[in-house]
Image: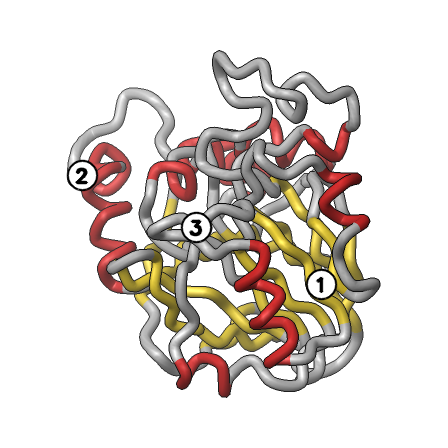
Amino acid sequence: MAGEGRLTITVLGSGTSVGVPTIGCSCAVCRSTDPKDKRLRPSILVSYGGRNVVIDTTPDFRYQVLRAGVERLDAVIFTHAHADHIMGLDDVRPFNFRQRSAIPVYGSPATIDTVRRVFQYVFADMDHRSSVPHLETRPVGAAPFELLGLSFLPVPLLHGGSPVLGYRFGRAAYLTDHSEIPPESLEQLQGLDVLFLDALRHRPHPTHTTVARALEYVEELRPQRAFFTHICHDLPHRETEAALPDHVRLAYDGLEIRVEMGT
């Protein structure tokens, strides 16, 4: 199956770490009735050949997979170990029940170490009196890894001063939570049909990319289509998108995109 067919990317969440609407905020975006201004924490579902892979399990994971109608989960891939990207991991348990198997979890060695520490009860050698997730942790390095017939290439990024990962798979790449894409990573992102990029807001931020900087990356990398994600409540969907080039859109929760699997 590798290199053949098409995959579907479903945006499970397009928001920043606190989501939109943001607790206690009464700004125009947080009060908006536009469904595209309702943004859960950032995550995508990659579906191909009857298989489903989630990139990041946010605190909204349970609702996200219920809303998307996900009935099986074959793997989890982590970009990094911040709370808004890992804290929904316990909610993979119903998939364990249904599938009667462990779910592999991929990420950098540092991310896997943090996941094992935060979810210590999952990995502790003890007699569990209630159900816990059944997981197999698989650290990844710089080399691509094959997952159920699809190759995933880890793409090193900087999130402020912290190293994190994006991933290229098929003719798509998903880069969230980054303030800089190193030159060597830019070389890995050529020839894409679809590129997801962090574009938090217009104002500078120490650990995230602005809309203007994200547009510069699009101009440099020239994907067929680009989608901005990890969006905060500074950006109203309709108004922001109207100012973007035609091949650049804002991601929104529930968006589905089909992409060729071949590289």
Calculate the distance from the C-alpha at mark 2 to the C-alpha at mark 3. Answer: 42 Å
Identify the residue position indicated by label 2 in the image.
124
Calculate the distance from the C-alpha at mark 2 to the C-alpha at mark 1. Answer: 33 Å
On the picture, is 263 further left or further right than 217? Answer: right
Residue at image point 54% right, 43% down = 42
Give yes or no for contact between labels 3 and 1 (Cβ–Cβ under 8 Å). Answer: no
Of the two numbered discs 2 and 3 on the same chain, state the one appearing first in sequence: 2
Identify the residue position indicated by label 1 in the image.
48
| Quarter of the figure that contains the N terminus | bottom right
Residue at image point 72% right, 45% down = 240
Of the two numbered discs 3 and 1 on the same chain, state the one appearing first in sequence: 1
Q: Is residue 209 visible?
A: yes
Of residues 239 and 128, the one nearer the viewer is: 239
User: Where's residue 2, x and y in %?
Assistant: 66, 81
| Quarter of the figure that contains the C terminus | bottom right
Residue at image point 52% right, 16% down = 25
Up/down of 140 relative to 250, above or below: below
